[in-house]
Image: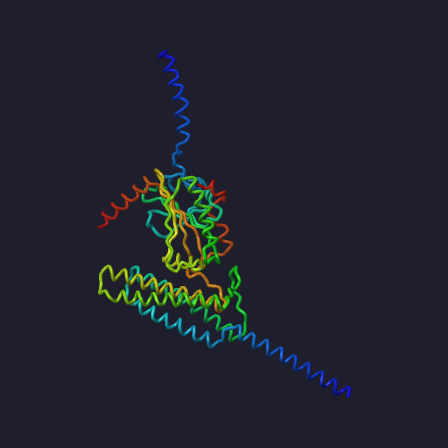
Amino acid sequence: MASLGKVAAVWLAALVVAFCATTALLVYLEVQPSTKELDTDIAAVRSEIAAAEKDASKYEGGLLRSMIDLRLQVLKTTEAMLQQKRSSYLRRITLNYNVPSGPITALKRDLNAMNSDIANAQAKLEADEKEAARYTGGLIQGLALATVATDNLTIAQLNLAYYGAKYGFVVPPINPPSSKSPGEKKENKPGVPVKDRDAF
Amino acid sequence: MRTLFCFAFCLLMAIHYPAHAAEEKPASDGAPFGLSWGMSTAEVKALGVELSDFPGKDWGSSFRATNLPKVIADAETVVLSFGFDDKLWRIVAISRPFENDPSGGATLARYDELNKILTEKYGKGHSVQRVDQYSDQKYFLMHIQGGQSVWFTDYDTADLTIQLGIGATDLSTGFWRLIFTQKALEADFKKAKSSGEKGAL
């Protein structure tokens, strides 16, 4: 009788442990976006990169080309961060970023709000593209195309912010930081710091 | 009586003019950061300032300056431009990055502090604050970076133009930028640049 009680107790303990582990795993899976979702997002960004590269090929230089180049930089940064996140999922490691800030975690309502902003930006882009298509050249079309380029850049930036919030990665600077080491930087201070009023 | 009147008049002038002169803004040979307008590179170096190469010759001979006699505490980069005749006519100061600041709160707060001091010293400036139609504050630096929004103030005195502005290196990193130009020396620079370009054609 006593041994039966012991066996029952062991089975009960095992069931409790299994239940807790399963719950923890389900919570983990629910909180973290899945690899499939990440792959979908990466594919979407790659498609945007291809479209931006096609746009870039239309211009040799000038304002439109430089705006498209900036948009490409933003998109490539987004792709790089998503790929890094995907690698961390596959290897089951937690990424540590060497920046003086913590990861950004967004509430679902924040993501929904950002999605809404992206949708609005997309609607504006479509309207501005239609407007630009009405002209065949000249200054007016140039201005209309500049507006379209601005809209595309806005969407790329909003997507980078959205993916950063969704996957909890810190958005790195789009322009590469100075290659100088912190030690070097310290020695190259501009001068003797004084109160603001006294500096002028 | 006449003598007394003349004496009183002279006494009045002697008191009035020095007081009036004291109210006028001092002559601004004095540039910011302990420098003087029109200094040569040799004279700047003689102060102990180190000048290193700076890419870009849009403003003539330009250098990144370190070891200045005095500088704003959070300035990270100072660029001095000497034009084509080795005379200091333009000074640019850029702040350290304000990181993790997508809404621009910290950057704007610092901008406001500097704006107040510049207004006290140089008079009220003309502000341009244009934000993108997506004026949600959380995208402020994003739109500054992309050019959809602009935020700066111009100050104008008899011999200086000054601009304080906000820039962004990415979606959440802002910085302030101060540009001083000495008007007379700027005019000389533009003349020299124009005649140089004409000569090249």
Question: Who's the residue at 49% across and 46% down the image?
Answer: B73
Q: Is residue B92 left or right of residue A14?
A: left
Q: Quadrant of residue A15?
A: bottom right
Q: Is residue B119 left or right of residue B58?
A: right
Question: Who's the residue at 39% across and 60% down the image?
Answer: B134
Q: Is residue A129 left or right of residue B119?
A: left
Q: Which quadrant is home to the N terminus of chain B?
A: top left
Colouring method of the image: rainbow
Q: On screen, A5 above or below A161?
A: below
Depth order, front residue of B149/A68: B149
- The mark total stands at 0
Depth order, front residue of A162/B176: A162
Question: Who's the residue at 48% across and 58% down the image?
Answer: B100
- Pick out the residue farthest to the right: A2
Task: Give coordinates of residue B26: x percent, y percent.
Answer: 40, 34
Task: Give coordinates of residue A37: x percent, y percent.
Answer: 46, 75
Task: Give coordinates of residue B161: x percent, y percent.
Answer: 36, 43
Q: Quadrant of residue B90?
A: top left
Q: On screen, B171 above or below A42?
A: above
Task: Give coordinates of residue A61: x percent, y percent.
Answer: 29, 61
Q: On screen, B198 above or below A126?
A: above
- Pick out the residue farthest to the top: B1
Q: On screen, A124 above or below A23?
A: above
Depth order, front residue of B182/B120: B120
